[in-house]
Amino acid sequence: MEKFTKLISTAVPLPIENIDTDQIIPARFLKATDKKGFGDNVFRDWRFKKDGTLDADFPINKPQYAGAKILVAGDNFGCGSSREHAAWAIVGYGFKVVISSFFADIFKGNALNNGLLPIQVTPEYLKELLAGIEANPELPITIDLENQVVETAFAKAEFEIDPYKKVCMINGYDDIDFLLSKKAEIEAFEKERMVF
Amino acid sequence: MGKTLFDKVWDAHVVDTVDNGPQILYIDKHLIHEVTSPQAFNELEERGIAVARPDQIVATADHNTPTQDQHLPIRDEMSRKQLQQLTENCEKHNITLYGLGHKYNGIVHVMAPELGITQPGMTMVCGDSHTSTHGAFGTIAFGIGTSQVGQVFASQSLLLNKPKSLRVSVNGTLAPHVSPKDVILYIISKIGTNAGTGYFCEYAGNVFEEMSMEGRMTVCNMSIEMGARGGMIAPDQTTFDYVEGRKFAPQGDAFAKAVSYWKTLPTDQDATFDKEYHFDAEDIAPMLTYGTNPGMGIKINGAIPEKGDMTFEKALEYMNFKGGAQLLDTPINYVFLGSCTNSRIEDFRIAASYVRGKHKAANVNAWLVPGSQQVAKQLEEEGLKEVFEEAGFALRQPGCSACLAMNDDKIPAGEYCVSTSNRNFEGRQGQGARTILASPLVAAATAIAGKIVDVTKEAVA
Ligand code: SF4
């Protein structure tokens, strides 16, 4: 996993609520057996029109947002299916941060396990941020993980992150590394308890 | 202070607590399928790690499998490769696989309980959000992402923060046409799709106590649709009777010993929950969804709300419904009886009792997809297969099928489908498809009438 400390980038606004993982990556793209390539199909049915051409009105497709590494989305982002492919698709497309006023549990975990930082802000801050981006698509947003702060020229907010996950993100290591270091404890536990 | 059912099972599985961080939770059973496991196997191989406890893993093929001609090679190349990879991975790592055509094959959340793999007091995970189904046994069961599948492969454990506790109680007497599916759709329509986020839910009250295991599974299955990681129901005699004698259930003395432990699991009288909801059974009616999330539900003879927020407007536009309208009499061309929510034998018995002696309407494509090979066999043995065939239903082979439309079972764009599955998201059953979630009885009645009819006005068998 890549290390994450600080990021300054523009953002794409996606002010839709309850974006579920079926929208992020539709099931028909889940047939691949590796993690690569999902970025091409992120938000597939919203990004492309029925005839297969790009929908120029969908925010991610707009030229003014090209290269943005931050996605700012409506409430309850990532609900629905537990498919981690959703996180791979977002990361694969080039995003490093998703900001919303609320994240579904499983998506949040999946994001953190793939170096994608989910930042939960208040509904008011989200609104302000969306309006700010709308007014100026080039608005730079600073994400400072160490100090748990998201900041623009006009507003600043602190965000929460699980302290353990924060250490993982900053150092670029993951849960498997940690769990393997606990092998002896896990085996001792197995010996002691009623095993099914 | 007393402990909840969830506390008891959770606490019994905590290996260690990280300072200022999550806990290491031991996992008893790990279920895997073809779609969410390949990347986890790859990860392990790239890092040179072995699967820690292959004997605690069971694999099935369900999500991406055809429901016709399962004995022939799969036509879609990517699907074929995905299944091949599952077979190879399981062979390489000594994992039991009930592949396509095996007599135990089926949707992971149907076959595991059926085989007695699911037992009270366990921790169970699967790379599928509807793993919550197994909570019907008093099991902590929840869906995980592929990275976590890899973690369980590597260590038979997961790093987790203990969720908060939520209890939903329903007491009273259900009306005759009201099924467990209606109970859970009603609950979600009342509390919304993220009321459960951050919580693990326990269902309590006489309504759940009186439910069959199949009904409890339907309820727990949809816990995720209200945002909860999982749902649980306290194990009782109904649970023990269901588990007893199943293939992988403990036998003889071991079973008696297990039961005496399972009896200690129900929530203590003085335990408290972080959040509670109470509902009266008398208020519940057969339900339908009108929108694009499972919380957008109304009573079958009710009306869609007049107005709502942006999500509401967007959903109505997608569904081509109007605020304030009723759904009764809406012509329906597709009916899907299946998915891990409602593809157990009991679901089909209810549907068959309605369908018997009738024929589906000419406009309807009615698909019936059993949850497992064992359910398919039961359909035959109980003579239900004939009932459905005579009524013009297309009987398919087991799998997830049109629940997520990963295989060829897709609902065409713009068409309505009354479906017994659990998700009515945009495009879930095929690009542009419009899903109306309902119980098996309502789905069966729709197939016969060719439109949505008020089942409360009809006699029940
Ligand atoms: S039937 Fe549907 S919800 Fe159930 S496991 Fe299959 S895809 Fe998931």
Image: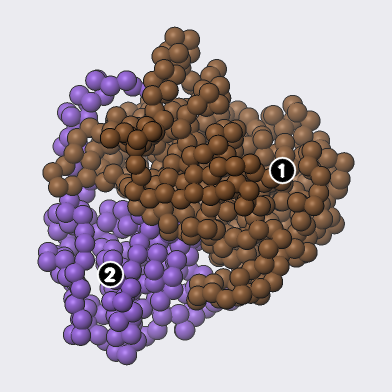
Residue indicated by mark 1: B176
Q: Quadrant of the N terminus of chain B?
A: top left
* Image x and y of residue A10, in percent: 26, 80
Instruction: Relative to B150, say whether B376 is above or below.
Output: above
Cα–Cα gap, marks 2 and 1: 46 Å
Question: At which x and y percent is residue B204?
Answer: 48, 39
Q: Which chain is brown?
A: B
**B295 displayed left or right of B364:** left
The secondary structure type at the circle numbered 1 is loop
Residue A85 in the image, given as x and y percentages of width and height? 40, 56
Q: Is residue B348 visible?
A: yes
Q: Quadrant of residue B55?
A: top left
Residue drawn where x is 47% and y is 36% of the image:
B233
Using residue B297 as the reference point, say whether residue A159 is left or right of it. Answer: left
User: Which chain appears purple?
Assistant: A
Image label count? 2
Between B201 and B30, which is closer to the camera in this rendering? B201
Specify whether A18 is left or right of A165. right
Locate the C terminus of chain B by quadrant: top right
Q: Is residue A101 left or right of residue B120?
A: left
Residue placed under numbered mark 2 in the picture: A121
Callout 2: few (<14), some (14-19), or many (20+) C-alpha neighbours within 10 Å? Answer: many
Query: The residue marked by circle 2 belongs to what chain?
Result: A
From the top left corner, tell me how far across and down residue B459 is, in percent. 81, 44
Which mark is drawn over residue B138? none
Q: Assess mark 2: CB under 8 A from ligand 1? A: no
Mark 2 residue element: loop
Q: Chain of mark 1?
A: B
* A70 and B300: which is toward the camera: B300
Residue drawn 57% across the image and 39% down it: B207
Task: Locate residue B435: give its quadrant.
Answer: bottom right
> From what the image shows, is residue A192 above or below residue A60?
above
